Amino acid sequence: DVRRFIRRERLLEPQEPLHVAVSGGIDSMVLLHVMRSLGHPCSVLHVDHGLRGAESEADRDFVEAHCRQEGIPFKWKRVDAAAFARANARSIQMAARDLRYAFFAEAWQERSHRVALAHHADDSVETLLMHLMRGVGIDGWSTIPPVSGIHVRPLLAVDRSAISAYALENGIRYREDSSNTENKYLRNRVRQELLPLMEAMRPGARRAMSRAVKLLRELERAGEAVRSVESLGLSASHELIIPFAAIENSPTPTVLLHHMLRHIGFHPDALERLHDAVLERRTGAEFIAGGWRAVIDRERVIVGPAHADHLAFTID
């Protein structure tokens, strides 16, 4: 239930005005209908990425006509995602996302209304599988967050089948995006090939993974507690000091090390070796990653720039 999810996640205040990102597809058209039915004054944001020619223009015309009919404020922007991708060495999908989110940020600066996005539970499952295939740290476990900056995702508690049923029940018209069927995108292959195979091998797999995403999201939040150790922080000498006791007394030492060191380039495998070195008291052991060096001292781990002279100390 979207209302319950909004309340539980504290996404929005009652009747809070919103921008709603609407492509014209079923997910975003349902999102717009749901948000308005819950009493939120909505304005619509639409982006033409310049990738599908006349089809993209027809999407814009469709969304604009719907907004005109319903008296919904409408704002759109055309961008050149392909040119942006070439100029910035980005994939087409990431370039389109960057340009889309930049437009949302512009809208926020104008009216300070948060932007509702139409990601749903199946999107979270697909993202988790993609992250697992590529390799992720802790921050990839919970996949798509309910809130990130100015963006809120009220449909994360419902799956694609529920969205389809809602659209049918409420007579919601929408347009199909032909790019959603192209197998050159990893997400489409996960959606059209991998997930059906997993469901065939284990009926109910999709629903089970959706529950797992919710639990992993809670776990990630619980793991944020270890960030308090970051109060040990980088000192004036640009070193991070981690006492062995902080690692050994933590109920989640791997989570702690991930939070403290993963973002500066330490691979999960290196963090496991570092943890072993702490437990085995391998004084003098060094671990290099991303221009940083972690050194096992007597009762602490010292992390600092790999080239820093002040990290060259004598080990007895």
Image (cartoon, grey):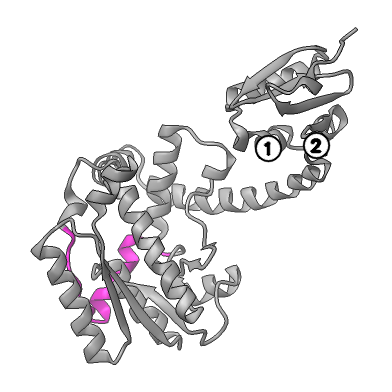
Residue 105 in the image: x percent, y percent? 45, 67
Q: Quadrant of residue 260?
A: top right
Q: Which residue type carries mark 1?
A: Val
Q: Is residue 177 above or below residue 45?
A: above
Q: Quadrant of residue 292?
A: top right
Please tell me whether mark 1 sits on a helix, a strand or a loop: helix
Please tell me whether mark 2 sits on a helix, a strand or a loop: loop
Residue 164 in the image: x percent, y percent? 27, 68
**Residue named by callout 1:** 255
**Residue named by callout 2:** 250
Q: Which residue type carries mark 2?
A: Ser
Please tell me which residue is depicted at 53% across the width and 49% down the height of the picture: 142
Which of the marked residues, 2 or 1, is nearer the chain's N terminus?
2
Q: How many numbered circles does the render carry? A: 2
Residue 130 in the image: x percent, y percent? 39, 40
Please tell me which residue is depicted at 27% across the width and 90% down the height of the picture: 70
Q: Quadrant of the C terminus?
A: top right
Residue range corresponding to the magenta coloring: 158-177
Given contact means CB atoms under 8 Å apart, are the residues at marks 2 and 1 in contact?
yes
Q: Residues within 10 Å of mark 2 (few under 14, many from 20)?
A: few
